[in-house]
Amino acid sequence: MNKRIGGLLHHAKQRLEAADCTDTPGLDAEVLLAHVLDRSRAYLVSHPEVRLENSQLVDFERFLIRRGKGEPVAYITGRKEFWSMTLEVNPSVLIPRPDTELLVQSCLEHCESHSHQIADLGTGSGAVALALASELPRCLIVATDRSREAVLTARLNASSLGLGNVSVRHSDWFEALGEERFDLIVANPPYIDPQDKHLSGEVRFEPRDALVAGNHGLADLTSIISRAPGYLVAGGWLLVEHGFEQGRLVRELFSDAGFHNVGTFQDLGGNDRVTEGKCGYFNRTKTPDLVLGSK
Ligand SMILES: C[S@@+](CC[C@H](N)C(=O)[O-])C[C@H]1O[C@@H](n2cnc3c(N)ncnc32)[C@H](O)[C@@H]1O
């Protein structure tokens, strides 16, 4: 049996290719082996002759079996890079997506050099809240999630990254925000239609509550957009991530809720991905909760 890095990587890539579980078999094999050895991928490339210990071989074999069954690399290693930070992830939180960096980037456009109060609804691993906290040390960020496991994970990530300007609360959307008002509210809520065929792919390992929303994926977006004016200061901004086919409907929801300066940004693939709007007033009673459909 080949025990050297070079040979192991070669065979692992062939196995993952044959399992047809990934578009990036070589990269996945490298990331998994680097994790086993607690080394960088560059080390693997420059040390193909190094032999693995038996215990390391066993770990690598276990990882390859899991990957071969479709489990995402990030759940196997327990880590995911987002906004140049390494976040701990586990099956109770969504794996942060590169597209969500557009949401962070769009928020930053509204926050330059001021001290703001920001809320991140449905924080999951804490990805968005922690990226904003790292860029905006003078801002206070309240992050909420309905999943207790997600709240614990986000708190752990905040602590590992030494970001003290984030407070993570267990909450059903706005519930734990009380009478607070925010300069900016950001959310990447579940927005996938329960019938979407992609739910049978690799995302089946991720929490369904983080992905799926009723009313063709719009139920949580509708709830958040309709209620947000009651938690924003006058002139405050709401930014949400949504599906690439939901841009027009989401803009209508913003307009119906009284937002102005409504606009949508496209992701790197040129798809509608993030919509924002400016709140013209502060009045909770004028914005009834329009929850349409259920999960
Ligand atoms: C699409 S994930 C986004 C996670 C993270 N913000 C990110 O971008 O990687 C949606 C998150 O919303 C949370 N969520 C779903 N329904 C919720 C609710 N009613 N109240 C609060 N959080 C909720 C899920 O637990 C999940 O963490």
Image (tube, helix red, strand yellow):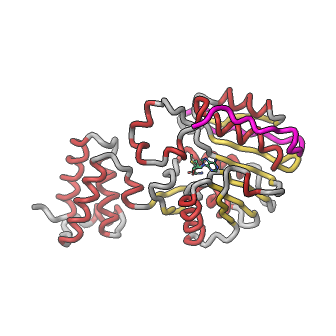
Split into 4 quadrants, where in the image is the N terminus? Answer: bottom left
Residue 145 vs residue 28: left or right? right
At x 58% / y 42%, what residue is drawn?
190
Q: Look at the picture and state if 165 lies above or below 99.
A: below
- The answer to whether one can see residue 89 in this image is yes
Picture coordinates of residue 43, whole percent (x, y):
32, 66
Q: Look at the picture and state if 188 lies above or below 48.
A: above
- Does the segment drawn in magenta span residue 279? yes
Split into 4 quadrants, where in the image is the C terminus? Answer: top right
Picture coordinates of residue 160, whole percent (x, y):
55, 71
At x 55% / y 66%, what residue is drawn?
157
Q: How many dots with numbers?
A: 0
- The answer to whether one can see residue 260 in this image is no
At x 27% / y 40%, what residue is drawn?
20
Q: Look at the picture and state if 264 lies above or below 89.
A: above
Q: Look at the picture and state if 176 lies above or below 277.
A: below
Task: Please report the bounds of the magenta region as a residue range.
Answer: 270-295
- Does the segment drawn in magenta span residue 229? no
Please, which residue is most extreme toward the left here?
A: 1
Of the pair 194 and 63, the residue shown nearer to us = 194
At x 68% / y 27%, what residue is drawn?
249
Q: Quadrant of residue 266?
A: top right
Picture coordinates of residue 172, whole percent (x, y):
67, 51
